[in-house]
Amino acid sequence: MIIKQLSIFVENKEGRLSEITQTLADNGIDIRALSIADTTDYGILRLIVNDPDKALKALKGEGMTVSLTDVIAIAVPDTPGGLNKAVKVLSSDNISIEYMYAFLNPRKDTAFVILRVENNERAIKALTAGGIRLMKNEEIYSL
């Protein structure tokens, strides 16, 4: 139920993102989803990839500051309000969402949402009880 997300420190300088994506490409790593949060001086690139351990090793080998973060992936209907049910489930159990990002499933009428929450175990229990489909890591990594 837990998905491994890469969190990469990215200095705001020309070519830095290209270095990261080139390293991933050179190592046969396929990006499944991404999000960038930035400030004036740096950003945090969050990636879901097909092989997080291999990506971690490759990026660290190039001297990059990178870590693995446990996140949850859920499937929601790709319709207006599709995300609302999951958010309500977490809210009603007083589980805070630290951040999230989503991407569409190209094969179905669903969207996948990556969630970073304050307590993964509580969130997994609440989402399961609320009828929200949790994605297995193999499902996400093999998209």
Image (tube, grey):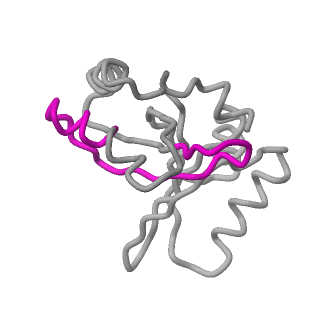
Of residue 133 and residue 29, the one placed in the foreground of this image is 133
Q: What residue span does the magenta drawing correspond to?
A: 86-112
Residue 80 lies, with reference to residue 1, above or below; the image says: below
Of residue 111 and residue 37, the one placed in the foreground of this image is 111
Q: Is residue 6 magenta?
A: no
Q: Tell whether 10 sits left or right of 81.
A: right
Pick the quarter of the image with the C terminus.
Answer: top right
Instruction: Where is residue 17? Give x, y as percent.
Output: 64, 68
Q: Tell whether 53 sits left or right of 125.
A: right
Q: Is residue 98 magenta?
A: yes
Instruction: Where is residue 28? Give x, y as percent.
Output: 84, 44
Residue at 61%, 51% (x, y): give it. 104
Q: Tell whether 58 sits left or right of 5.
A: right
Residue 17 lies, with reference to residue 2, above or below; the image says: below
Question: What is the total number of numbered labels drawn onto the structure image?
Answer: 0
Residue at 63%, 52% (x, y): give it. 63
Residue at 20%, 35% (x, y): give it. 95
Instruction: Where is residue 82? Give x, y as percent.
Output: 42, 47
Instruction: Where is residue 4? Give x, y as percent.
Output: 54, 33
Residue at 38%, 52% (x, y): give it. 81
Q: Tell whether 55 sits left or right of 25.
A: left
Of residue 17 and residue 124, the one placed in the foreground of this image is 124
* Residue ranking furthest to the front: 80
Q: Quadrant of residue 141?
A: top right
